[in-house]
Image (cartoon, grey):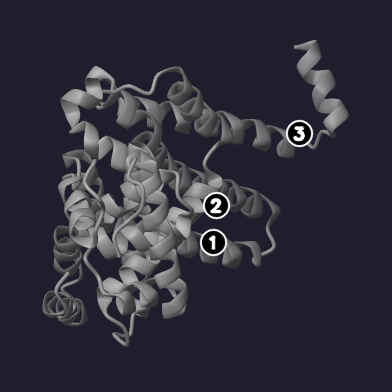
Amino acid sequence: MAPSSDAAIFDLYRAGHIEEAFRKLVAEHGDNVYNTALFTLNDEILAQDASQEVFLRVYRNLKRFKGDAQLSTWLYRIVKNVCYDLLKKRKPERLEERQESQLRDDSPTPEIEAMADWEHHQLHEAVAKLQYSQRLALTLYYFQERSYEEVAEIMEQPLGTVKSHLHRGKAALARLLGNDEPDE
Amino acid sequence: MNERMNDTNLRQMFQQSRRTMPPGLEARLLDIPAAETTALRWRSGAVVLAASVLVIFMSGQSLVRLISLASYTLGVWGLELVHSARYALYETVMRQVSPWIESVPLGFTGALIALMAMSLALSLWVIVSKQSDAGLLTSLRSS
């Protein structure tokens, strides 16, 4: 995440150590890419597919990266596009299955209880109900702890629009999680 | 969850939901350079083969043309098939039943290649016997 490590990775790539640079990139950003995909897609398998597609595109296009933006900004723009494409392609029946199962039983399954904290599951479910731009903005801002400017750069949207996504997303999240109104 | 949400709480909630990438996924990501290199090698091979075929084609001998057409088809199909079968296995089957499939990927790929060879043989037979579609159907029915 740190620009210096991104610069080191890019230098390594330019020096011809392509595989080593790629390994470092996966080590540095793999978890964050996976978690960002998980927040925006709320589907374990899709998040894994998204992560693989992201790094495949990165590997194929790294030679076109000129270093004019930060490597991580470029990387998360790819994450944004890949997750959006996957959401569009997601089979409706899969979505319906999820919605049906949610209607049948909204309590945590033993697997969920065993795998992760119920609160975390609720957060993922709540984020999944937001608009895509809000999900992505919230994930970049709160999960990756990026600044407004960085979020705007990754989302390729004006700063005001990003702030609006964050404000509305936060309000919606507060409602979904049972809080009345978010603190400013 | 009942606390009023401020930026710090939200940040904390998001951070606490962090999960580690599954080891299987990490292996898949780290395999990308090797897989891409292999794919590149197959494609380069196919291009070289195609170029060779083009040269042979221009020699004008019909038998040579036929053989080169067959080898070209065999080469491209074979290479692409092996390449795509590898990905197909990885993507669809390996993830679901990896303990079982890991013991038979060669057999599976072999079966696909056999299928491709049969299809190629049929195509060649059609070309060599110079039969029309209708004639071919009649021959197949009578056999």
| Residue at the farthest bottom position | A68
Query: Spatial distance from mark 1 to mark 2, Cα to Cα?
Result: 6 Å
| Residue at the farthest top position | B142
Q: Residue at label 2? A: B72
| Element assignment for label 1 | helix
Give amino acid for label 2: Tyr
Asked if one can make out residue A42 in the rendered structure from this viewpoint, the answer is no
Asked which quadrant contains residue A11, the reply is bottom left
The residue closer to the viewer here, A128 or B22, is A128
Residue B129 image label:
3
Q: Position of residue B46 (x, y in %)?
A: 47, 58
Quadrant of image for the C terminus of chain B: top right
Q: Residue at label 1? A: B50
Which residue occupies 18% across, 60% down?
B8
The residue carrying pointer 1 sits among few (fewer than 14), some (14 to 19) or many (20 or more) residues within 10 Å by Cα, namely: some
Q: Nearer the viewer, mark 3 or mark 1?
A: 1
Determine whether, in the image, residue B28 is placed left or right of residue B127: left
Quadrant of image for the N terminus of chain B: top left
Q: Mark 3 lies on which chain?
A: B
Q: Position of residue A174 (x, y in %)?
A: 35, 49
| Residue at the farthest front position | A180
| Element assignment for label 3 | helix
